Amino acid sequence: MLIQYLVRLRIPIVFFIGFLSLSIQAAEVTKEQIKGLDEQVQDIKKDVLALTSELTRLEEKLLFPSNTQVSLFVSLSGDDDFVLDSMQIKLDNKVIAQHLYTFKEIEALRSGGVQRIYTGNIKTGDHALVASFIGRAKSGDAYQRSENFTVSKVVGPKFVEIQITGSSASDQKVTFKDW
């Protein structure tokens, strides 16, 4: 009866039989086979993550050779009532980085974290760096500060930490630290 129905619908019997055999084979997959497949997938994920990390490192070496590389970092310390909203960095009167901070990023900075806000290439010599931030006290009062710094670049990588410190929300200052 079923075969006559399929013939009337012009569905090839071979297709129907093939579909039945596939569904029977799918039902025969054991839990051990699924577990083995899952372990293989996890191994592949680990390999992909390792390769991605290595490629990122190689890309950074290629794009930012150590003899011209400059990296700028932001850190936050001091009063817990101060909330950092945004940061803008200018190098030689050109905006090179801007960042709006999330709650999690502020918490990470308060816990001693350091954010790499910029990595790029500059020529050797002196360069004007201006770091500006906008923040607020938990009471809602807004504060904005800017500070100038001269980056002296020599052959080799240059690292500068931009520190936002202060004993109260209204007393936050920008300082610079060469590494």
Image: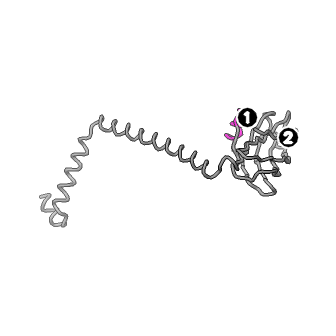
Magenta span includes 109: yes
Name of the residue lying farthest toward the right? 171
The residue wearing badge 1 is 110
Magenta span includes 56: no
Q: Quadrant of the C terminus?
A: top right
The three-letter amino acid code for the residue at tag 2 is: Lys
User: Comparing marks 2 and 1, which lies closer to the viewer?
Assistant: 2
54 or 104, nearer to the observer? 54
Instruction: Give the magenta range.
Output: 102-113
Can residue 101 be seen by looking at this rendering? no
**Quarter location, residue 72:** top right
What whole-number distance in Å separates the C-alpha atoms at marks 2 and 1? 15 Å
Q: Position of residue 7 (x, y in %)?
A: 15, 65
Q: Position of residue 41 (x, y in %)?
A: 39, 41
Q: Secondary structure at mark 1?
A: helix
Sequence order check, earlier mark of 2 and 1: 1
**Quarter location, residue 79:** top right
Residue at 60% x, 51% y: name it: 62
Q: Quadrant of the N terminus?
A: bottom left
Residue at 78% x, 34% y: name it: 77
Q: Position of residue 24 (x, y in %)?
A: 21, 46
Q: As drawn, is 112 to the left or to the right of 139?
A: left
Q: As drawn, is 58 to the left or to the right of 150?
A: left
Q: Position of residue 75 (x, y in %)?
A: 75, 38
154 or 49, nearer to the observer? 154
> How are the residues colored?
one colour
The residue wearing badge 2 is 173
103 or 36, nearer to the observer? 36
Can residue 170 be seen by looking at this rendering? yes
Label annotation for residue 159: none
The three-letter amino acid code for the residue at tag 1 is: Arg
